Amino acid sequence: MAIRQVLTYPDKRLRVRARPVEKVDDRIRRLIDDLAETMYAEPGIGLAAPQVGEALRVFVIDLASPKGGELRAFVNPRIVRAEGEIVWKEGCLSFPGISEEVTRADRVRVEALDRDGKPFSLEATELLAVAIQHESDHLDGKLLIDRVSFLKKRMIRRQMAKWNAEHGLDAEAEAG
């Protein structure tokens, strides 16, 4: 296992639509382990492969993070049903120090493969439902900043430019 660097906005790799995993093998299990270790180190409750520069449809969630213990791996996840509405203050490891209220479905049903390549489906509500939707967005190249108002986008862009400069990152600005 290895802790990977989490890409921060506006890194263009965060906008790439992830491709499906063809086979869950040792390489994918290593990626899942790396995602988990990175998520716990940050600490966060979810992390998608595109956030560490891997354009694959994989993410992990652990609502007990940073303590760990409830790790769930999702390979080729697909939200097959979404119901209700909930507003949740979301953060994102690709937007350090930023959290915004986002409207999501309150209940989702997701189908995916686990770390052994076995299919499963899961009904989720509240925080788990929000986390699944948030990480699924990453797989489609959608980001937290896409779900806020124009004025909040401007504010987030400024905050991220300052954060990247303070951390010596030379991220190219995203258009739009």
Image (cartoon, rainbow, N blue to C red):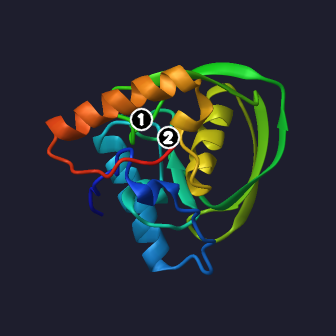
The amino acid at mark 1 is Ser
Side (left or right) of 3 relative to 89: left
Residue 47: image location, x then y, percent: 46, 48
Quarter placement of the N terminus: bottom left
For residue 124, the mark is: none
Which is more toward the observer, 136 or 156? 156
Q: Which residue is denoted by mark 2 in the rendering?
A: 62
Q: Which residue sits at x=58%, y=27%?
A: 148
Q: Which residue sits at x=73%, y=65%?
A: 119
Side (left or right) of 138 relative to 166: right
Q: Which residue is denoted by mark 1 in the rendering?
A: 65
Q: Which residue sits at x=14%, y=45%?
A: 168
Q: Which residue sits at x=78%, y=39%?
A: 108
Label 2, residues with CA under 10 Å away: few <14, some 14-19, many ≥20: many
Task: Tell me whether circle 2 and circle 1 mark residues in contact (CB < 8 Å).
Answer: yes
Which is more toward the observer, 61 or 56? 56
The amino acid at mark 2 is Asp
Helix, strand, or loop for circle 2?
loop
| Image position of 152 with respect to 170: above or below | above
| Image position of 57 with respect to 51: above or below | below
Which is more toward the observer, 63 or 22? 22
